[in-house]
Image (tube, rainbow, N blue to C red):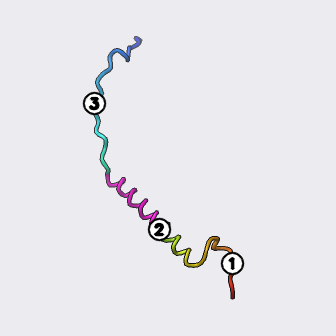
Amino acid sequence: MSTQDFQSGNAALPQVEKPRFNVYTMMLIISLIFIILAIVMLYNELALYGSYPWWNTSEATV
């Protein structure tokens, strides 16, 4: 077997275009937006019932 000199004979690599957004990337972005929206809405819903920590019921009156 012979050793090849890879540094002297750099072959020109074909130029590859960067892929554009496809449908799966858009679905990931849309799902991220809706998850963030759900977190904000959950926080607003929990804020209606009092302050943090919501599981502390020592101040509850009957």
Which image quadrant is residue 28 in? bottom left
Give the foreground label among 2 and 3.
2
- The residue pinned by badge 1 equals 57
> Which residues fall within the magenta stretch?
22-40
- Disc 1 marks a residue whose amino acid type is Thr
- Disc 2 marks a residue whose amino acid type is Ala
Name the N-terminal-most of marks 1 and 2. 2
Where does the image place residue 33, in percent across and percent down from the top left? Answer: 41, 61
Q: Secondary structure at mark 3?
A: loop
- The residue pinned by badge 2 equals 38
Q: CA distance from mark 3 to mark 1?
A: 67 Å
Q: CA distance from mark 1 to mark 2?
A: 25 Å
Identity of the residue drawn at 31% across and 51% down:
22
Name the N-terminal-most of marks 2 and 3. 3
Where does the image place residue 6, in percent across and percent down from the top left? Answer: 37, 17
Residue 42, compared with residue 9, is above or below; it is below
- Disc 3 marks a residue whose amino acid type is Pro
- The residue pinned by badge 3 equals 14
Where does the image place residue 44, in percent across and percent down from the top left? Answer: 51, 73
Determine contact: label 2, label 3, CB under 8 Å: no
Judge whether residue 47 is colored magenta: no
Which residue is outermost to the right?
58
Q: Secondary structure at mark 2?
A: helix
